[in-house]
Image: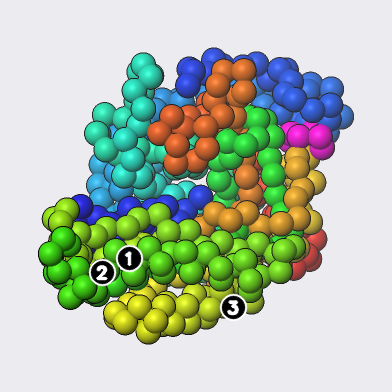
Amino acid sequence: MNRTQLITSLVAALIIVAVSTPTSAGELVPGTGHGILFDGKVREQAGVPEGVVQALWDMQEELTKWRRDFHRHPEVGYKEVKTHAYIMKVLSEMKFEPKSFGPTTGIVLDVPGRDKSLTIGIRADIDGLPITEIDDGREYRSEIEGYFHGCGHDAHMAIALGLAKALADGTFEAPVNLRFFFQPAEELGTGAQEMIDAGVLDGVDIVIGLHVDPTREWGRAGLIDGTFSAFANAFSVEVTGLASHGGMSPELGRDAIVGAAYLITQLQTVVARNVAPPDAATISVGMLNAGTVLNQIADKAVLMGTMRAQDAEIYETVKERMTEVVEGTSKSMDMPMKIELLIEMPGVVNNPEMFKVILPSLQAVLGSDNVDVYSEANMAGEDFAEYSLKRPSFFFWLGIANEEKGINHTLHHPAFDIDERALVVGVAVQIQNIVKLAEHHAAGGKF
């Protein structure tokens, strides 16, 4: 594995099986509070036409097809050429005019709405992971060996296409201007910034997005008011030693492996003795490459890892102490150690006014007992953060698990899968979110 492959693998790690059967509009999910999507009485009380909800459930077969097509043909960051072509084809068949966007594989689709004074950006990431999917007999298993949609971006794309289809067939009329952006290279942590640099946020007022969540059953959602995800980085440390014979003259060398091993143990003290117990931070070294001959003192070692924290202040403290520990260990071991931050990613920060709109929106669709509000940021890295730095934004978790069917593997696990009924849920909640955000704007609300 060369250095480029190492960096790609490490940075991908930054980012946070059964075939599902179609459901009817009246089927209920866990929780006692039934929402519009699952309860006819609630729909009647809310004045939601039965045909609208049934039209969404009728979309499941097509949503599943799109998701499985993406799943069979994953492509990693900036190489999503076939994925790009597929999305362009599907949207064009809906009579839309999508446009290639940015210097690589991004796509933008603008849909005008009734009210031109607000434009909502809708983001879907499109890249897969350099992971080999487990072969458990699924007919839609990845056909590209060594690559896999193990983070659910296939579902994100399918949901965005489903939302576009709802607009195209008249199930849903855009109340305000909508801009879909299909973004490359989320797993590399650089795709969002590339799209921003190319102007994707020009004319966009607010941005929404979601991420599939294997810790919640399908039909559930999770959200937070404030920081959604960790402030994160990927780092490498190159340790330079001095080669010599490991048996005849070890005293003449400087053992880079020993230096790297000692550094790893020292790094584990940074969080333990610099971060208060109620706060969250972590330093994890996931890769160590050194040595070419078993009886030689290695003259070079490269370790790579990730550091994360729940807020910016803790992140800066840990980053500073980590750098100091590398410098101090270098001096004590008498060998050069060079730390490099391969990428830094801010945390996603949810807009508080959008939270006030989206919480009741999700509760209306799913039922209040099926919407979880939590108070601490998760430790995933997510480059949706770049949008949240530039525009009022909101990002939430969409449940996709099914414990009974064994669909409960974590993100990036080689057996990761989803209950595909969650695709319909994703379309439904985003429609409701758009409607309620538009109503908030029309009533004079600010974001």
| 155 is higher (above) or lower (below) than 248 | above
Q: Closer to the camera, 374 or 239?
A: 239
Q: Is residue 366 magenta?
A: yes
Q: Is residue 43 visible?
A: no
Q: Are marks 2 and 1 in contact (CB under 8 Å)?
A: yes
Please tell me which residue is depicted at 48% across the width and 82% down the height of the picture: 324
Q: Is residue 209 visible?
A: yes
Mark 1 crowdedness (10 Å alpha carbons): few <14, some 14-19, many ≥20: some
Q: Position of residue 317 (x, y in %)?
A: 59, 78
Q: Position of residue 89 (x, y in %)?
A: 31, 39
Identify residue type, mark 3. Thr
| 380 is higher (above) or lower (below) than 19 | below
Identify residue type, mark 2. Asp
Q: Position of residue 170 (x, y in %)?
A: 56, 35
Which residues, given as a range, are shown in magenta? Answer: 365-370
Q: Are marks 2 and 3 in contact (CB under 8 Å)?
A: no
Circle 1 residue: 258
The outermost residue toward the right is: 45
Circle 2 residue: 255
Q: Is residue 339 magenta?
A: no
Q: Closer to the camera, 325 or 8?
A: 325
Give residue 69's quadrant in the image. Answer: top left
Q: Position of residue 209 (x, y in %)?
A: 57, 51
Give residue 224's quadrant in the image. Answer: bottom right
Circle 3 residue: 317
Q: Closer to the camera, 390 or 281?
A: 281
Instruction: Assign a secondary structure to mark 1.
Output: helix
